[in-house]
Image (tube, rainbow, N blue to C red):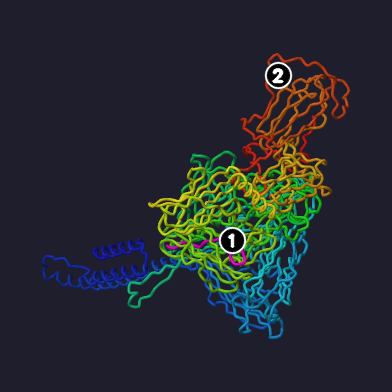
Amino acid sequence: MPARGVTLYRQEQTQHQSSKHVVQHSRKSSSQVVKKEQVQATKAMAEQAYTVPTFRERAPEGMQEYQRMAAHFGRDLVQLQHELHRMKVATKEQVDNIEITREVKGMMPLRKDYSAEVPKAPNFLVSLRSHTMWEKTPVKLFCTVSGKPNPIVKWYRNNVAIEPLSAPGKYKIENKYGVHSLIISRCAVTDSGIYSAVATNPHGKATSKATVCVRRPLGGGELSHLPGQVPLLSGIHPSKLEVTLLESFGVTFGTEGESVSLVANMVVVPDLPNLPPEAMWYRDDTLLMPSRWAEMSIGGGVAKLTLPHLNKDDEGLYTLRIWTKDGTAEHSAYLFVKDATPTVAGAPGAPMDVAVFDVNADYVLVSWKPPNTTHEAPITGYFVDRRKSGTKDWVQCNDSSVKVCKLPVHGLTEGASYHFRVRAVNKDGISLPSRMSSGVTAAEVESDVEVIKIEGKYDSTGGTTMRYTRFQFSLMYVTIPDPPTNVHATEINKTYIVLSWTPPSPRGRAPVWYLNEKCVGDSHIWQRVNTAVQLRSPRFPVYDMEDKKYYRFRVITVNKYGSSEPSEPTAAIQKVDPYGVPSAPGQVIASRNTKTSTFVQWQPPKHANNLMGYYVDASLVGSKKWFPCNHRPYKHTRFVVHGLVPGDTYVFRVQAVNAYGLSDESQDSAPLFIDAALSGAVEYATPSAPYGISLLNCNGSSMTLAWKRPKNTGGSKITSYYLDKREAESVDWKEVSPSPAAHRTFTVENLTTGVFYEFKIQAANLAGVGLPSEPSKAFACEAWTMAEPGPAYDISFWEVRDTSVLVQWKPPVYAGAGPITGYFVDMAKKGSSDFVAVNAEPVGHCYLKVSGLDTGASYVFRVRAVNAKDVGKASDVSDPVCAKVLPGNCNTALLPTVSTHQQPFFNMQHIGFVPNHISFLIGTQKMFMEANGITFHCMIKSVKETAFTWFKDDEEIPVDVPPNPMSGSCSLPIPMFSRKDQGIYKAVLGDDRGKDTSVYDISGKVFEDIINAIASIAGSSASDLVLQCTPEGIRLQCYMKYYTEEMKTSWFHRDSKISSSEKMRIGGTSEMAWMQICEPTDKEKGHYTIEIHDGKKSHSRTFDLSGQGNVQMCYMNYLLSVDRGRVVGGLPDVVTIMEKKSLSLTCTVRGDPSPEVTWFKNEQEVVSDDRYKITFEGGKFASLTINNVYVEDSGKYSINVRNKYGGEFVEITVSVYKQGGDIPEPKLGQMSKPTVTPKPATPAPQSVKTPTPPTPTPSVKSPTPTPPPSVKSPTPTPAPKSPTPPRSMRSPTPPRSMRSPTPTKK
């Protein structure tokens, strides 16, 4: 073979071999290289393969041989070229085939893996279809859904999961070849609703809904229709029916496991069998829906709610609300559910209100409310159980009990549905399980599937548009996921913490899971936390943390391609309880309600700490055994306790509840004797409903309201008002303020601008809280900006005559753009809407005498305020008043008044008229009585502007509102009229021409006449004597329109006049006269009489204390009063101790103000020295310690605890015996023989009093403790609360586990 041919062959072979090692990424690029090499090979073959060298010329004889050899080699060369070309082509084809095969083999696994792992969110290829069918026929709902991995389909009805096992044979769920179906056999009317199929997989969620309407043939009974759907009968709607509730359910008591039905009878007009009224049932503020726990029915004039299996979850206030033609008809009553008998004696009651939230793929958080414990041992922890839907086996979630009422549960199966229940544990055993929670499906609540649109280059000209989910989009570019973000702790307590984080975005090409790491403090040594658990949810509970150590955490995202970088670590976290239990509630006050119930209210705790509610307990006085009044935490600070025994005496206490347990008990209430609120008038015990709610002002975030007092006070004065509010579009009422309103105006704060609100009000007196008012009309919360003033309010009537009446009102709260300059009064006859103005010109004061009325006719009035801008909006229309003199009033023509208001006039002499200087006339001055004093009223007629001034004893009297003589009258009110108001009064009127004066002397007989007139009004309006129990004993009270000490008032006991003394104190306020009987005994029984003399006759009221038990009851209240100094526990009756031991006598004392404490031995005061140590800590704990006792220390020891309200004297007998001697058995009160006690070497200090700083206390010998003029309440002012001890100090109330407050005797 020629050398050049061989060389070319080798070069070509080298090129072929090198081409085999080129890595190509696509088939297209490989074919281009092959074509290029073929072209080069063709060019190389076209060239001459061998060049004959130039030889020197040969001789002719050698030429023939040369030609023969050249021809021979030429044939060989042609054959060699053909063979080389053939080999080159074959080799190239073989190389190409090998390269293509290798490329295909490399692409096949990737294509197969890619096609198998492409994720896809659920998508309904065939959606659900709505159906309408007749009753008792089956229906089949089906749908087709796609997605990778295969989605899990869950069926719902009205957003409630369908459980086939809950109604065997009713539902059938199938899944065949991607077609999911729900079959409902024999449909009933109640099966109507909205059905939905929810498909879920790790990459998203899809929902398909359809409506199923089951109808009943006409005449077949009740007509079924969906909410909001128009019924078949045109022209009639359930809200157009007239419904009147008759006999309804009352307060009901039940036990767990029993069945209870609440039934209400009604009259429906028209009564159509196929169109019953629309009724709604509420428990507290929650609307109830038909379920396995609640069955509802209405028809035939009966509305019924059946609770087939009671649990404490069912306890609450049940309300039936029925839509009627005029609005709604409502009825409410409380259902009490007590604990079932535990399987183990002493075990606690079952928890309640188990709820599941923060649901994720394999994690949920379970919460519940703790049970009440009275005589049971305290709860030490809880166990949580779970059960998969469709099974009956319960699995315990936590190995050790958890103390807080929340537990994170992880390790759930994604897509599975679970139920949860809770059991409580104490030292005696485990409680019965709670009611199981509603079913919950472990799945991600929110999907991270997002559609991303990628437009083609020529999309605007018809190019294609591709849509990818975010997950699919990340598959094309991202393999390894990013780290999570926002790692933090959502739950922290001493048992566990819960870590939470935001999933990474993007997540990579495959599903992810998470790894948690922790380090102690600021170290950088990270330790894996979840080594054996693969987390699919962005939540994880951590338990293994040491106390008092700080930890940091971080999270790593992992998929099959690798792991991300660690997240940013959290801040330092310590395992602590951030809140703890609430502090104890404040003062508890119990008052009578009915013969079997009482009204209890209390102050909220100072530290609520995420309060859940309150538990109220009661105990018979003297029994020391407490029983629960409610079994489910109550949210408000007032509660009506039912089921009490008439004639028994109870005390009450309250505990606050949160997720960490129960607070300390509050102080016990004062003992309350259970009886009707007011004997002889039980039906009027509580006030009737207020009415006439009006809006006085609004600034956009608050509203000022006013209302009218109830028409029936219930026999005692109204002390407070409770307000509730709701948005106009809502049906749930909310308490406006925990503190009641003291007056008939109130400003409601924290409202939302632009929202319409409705209000209702309840009045309260000594008997309790009355009925609520009708809801007010909807008021818009929009700031008032108009220039004219707002409405006047509180229109009242005085001096009602046959032809006239004095109208009085209160000025508007909103004055508008300027000060109010006057008022217009409009009137109309009762039943008419045609109002006419009474006065042509505005009056400058808040009253007006209206004349020219028809005798016996009834009128209504309204008032409009005026300012410089315009006339304001009219007030609400007043109640009607009849122009007619009532019989039995005073003997002048001007005296008849309305009902209880009697105000006589006194004509005043006019003196000092100077006609030469002033050309106007001062008319007759008058003085008339008001509710709490008198008022001078001067009628003036003037022709020009003048100055008007009032004087008393030649000193000018300052007035709040300057007089306006041009109005025709000027007034001078004198509130709280008494002896200090005697003097010479002058009314001076003048201008530049001169002045005139009118003088009236109030002294001597004039003063007595005024006092007698006041006494006449007071005596006529005096109420019957009322018995009031006070911390000092018994108080007899007589309410009247006005009272002053100058009135001739006398008190009698058994026809003997009573003089004010330390035992019998006599006094009064502006609204009542009272007599206080201090420390009552049986001697104070008998008839008591008060006589009020008006100069002409006497008005008497009598009260009989004999044979009613009132003295004993008030005396017991006096003894148990929290204000009086007393010993509440800790001292034994007898102490026996061996010689040379230390004796400590310790007790808890109580009183407000803090009492003084004195110790005695054998009736001799004990002073503190080296052996006798006396302490008094915190104003509550008093102790006497004797070091190294001897036989001479035996005797009778006593403690005297006393403050300004009284005190208590407690005796203890101490017996000391020698070592080895017999233990003596001394009798109670036995004293040892007097012995001489050696005096201490150091001077004896003063008697130990209270260690608190001395404060001046009022004298108890004052015969008439008159309150300041501002005090108007007839009830005595309660004593201030005792200071709250620091949180570190234990409550003096013994724990529930202690049977007796008396400690173990030494």
Q: What SS does tag 2 mark?
A: loop
What's the amino acid at mark 2? Asp
**What stretch of residues is rendered in magenta?**
787-805
In the visual, does 1134 lie left or right of 572?
A: right
Distance of label 2 from label 1 (alpha carbons): 73 Å
Q: What SS does tag 1 mark?
A: strand
Residue 845 can be seen, yes or no: yes
- Foreground tag (2 vs 1): 1
Q: Quadrant of residue 878?
A: bottom right
In the visual, does 499 lie left or right of 1127?
A: left
From this viewpoint, which residue is outermost toward the bottom? 218
> As displayed, is residue 527 above or below residue 439?
above
In the visual, does 60 lie left or right of 865?
A: left
Q: Most prominent secondary structure in the magenta stretch?
A: loop
**Circle 2 crowding by C-alpha within 10 Å: few under 14, some 14–19, many from 20:** few
Q: Nearer the viewer, residue 188 or 1049?
A: 1049
Asked if residue 178 is among those painted magenta in the image, a careful observer would answer: no
Residue 200 can be seen, yes or no: no
To which residue does mark 1 refer?
796
Q: Position of residue 689 (x, y in %)?
A: 65, 62
Q: Position of residue 727 (x, y in %)?
A: 55, 64
Q: Nearer the viewer, residue 55 or 906?
A: 906
Q: Quadrant of residue 25?
A: bottom left
Asked if residue 795 is among those painted magenta in the image, a careful observer would answer: yes
Q: Position of residue 947 (x, y in %)?
A: 43, 52
To which residue does mark 2 refer?
1170
Q: Quadrant of the C terminus?
A: top right
Q: Nearer the viewer, residue 113 or 848?
A: 848
